Image (cartoon, helix red, strand yellow):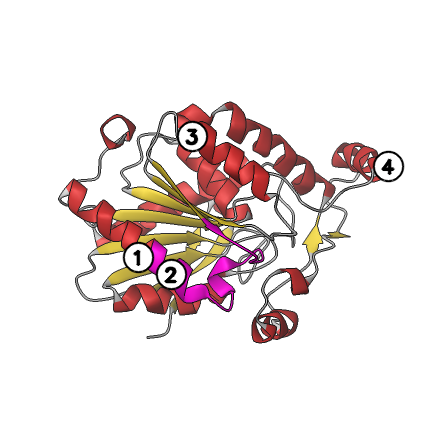
Amino acid sequence: MRGAHAYFSGSGNIRLHYRCWDVPTPRAVVIICHGLGEHSGRYEELAQDFARAGLSSYALDHRGHGRSDGRRGHVRRFTRYVHDLEKFRRRVFGAVGPDVPLIFLGHSLGGLIMIRYLQEYPAVPAHGVVLSAPLLGMAMEVPQWKERLSGLLYYAMPALPMSTGLDPEHLSHDPEVVAAYRRDALVHDRITPRLYGEIVGEIEQAFAKVSQLRLPVLVLIPSADKIVRPDLMQQFAAELRKVSPVQVRTFAGLYHEVLNETTRSSAVADILGWIERRIPQYSGSPTTAESAS
C-alpha cells in the first residue's frame, strides 16, 4: 500500500499537502505530525505497520515543509501550525467518519505541535496521543551571542533563513536512514529567527499549561538523543502524569528517531500495543479529558 496524495486549505488559506494510507473498515485512524525539516513521506514504513494492524494513517506536511506551500522553515506564529492541525483533523474525520477512533502521533516539532494543539483544543474527540521525542528543549547548546542575535532578528529580519545545524548522523544508528535523509529532496535544514523564537515560547507554554492536556499519552524517549533533551521529556511526562494517564517508554542508547532506528520494531510494537489498549476502552466513542483520565 502506498500513500495517496492530496491537498487542503490550511489556516489563512495556505495550500497544504498530505498523504493518507487507508485500509478498508479501519479499526482506528492515526494522524501523524512530522518533525522540523522533514515531511510526511518519511512515515510511509510506519503507516504500513499500522495498515497491517488495521489502522488508517493520515500525515500532513506542515507549512514550509515537504510539498506544502510556505517559506521553508518559517512561520509567522506557531498558532498557525495548531490551526492547520485542527483543519486537517476535520478533513480526516470527513474522510473516515467521526465514529472511527482517533489517535494522534507527533514526532519532535510535531510532538510540540500536538501538545499545544491538545492544550488549546481540550475537547477534541480523540483516544490518545503518542509523543515521539517531543521538542521540549533543544539538546544542542546555543551560544549566548546567537541567542541575543536571534532575539533581535525575530523582529528585524524574522524570515531570514538560517541553518538548523542538525547533523543527520544524530537521527539514527541506521546508515541507510541517514543516507536516505541526506538525499531526500523534500528535506531541508532551514529555520528562521521567527520560528526559533516561536518554538522557544511554545515550549514554555507547553510546560505552563501541562494540566490542560487530558488524554492518555504514550511518550517515547531516546536516552541518547542529541537533538532534543531527554531529561525535559521525562520532566514533562512526570508533570503530565499528575492529571492524565501517561506511559513512558525509554530507549537506552538510541538517537532522536526511535521509529527509524535499527531496533524500530520494538518502538512500533509498543505503539501498537498501547493503541490496542486504548480502542476497547472507548467502545468506539471518543471521550473528552475528564472521562479519559
Q: Secondary structure at mark 3?
A: helix
Q: Amino acid at mark 4?
A: Trp
- The residue beneath circle 3 is 240
Q: Could you give the CA–CA distance between mark 2 and mark 1, rounded to whole angstroms?
A: 6 Å
Q: Nearer the viewer, mark 4 or mark 2?
A: 2
Disc 1 marks which residue? 272
Q: Is residue 203 above or below residue 266?
A: above
Q: Are marks 3 and 2 in contact (CB under 8 Å)?
A: no
Element on which disc 4 rests: helix
Which corner quadrant holds the N terminus? bottom left
Sequence-first tag of 3 and 4: 4
Residue 6, can we see it? no
Residue identified by numbered label 4: 145
Q: Quadrant of residue 138?
A: top right
Inter-mark Cα distance, 4 to 1: 44 Å
Q: Label 2: which residue?
A: 268
> Disc 3 and disc 2: Cα gap in Å?
23 Å
Highlighted range, magenta: 250-270
Residue type at the position of mark 2: Val
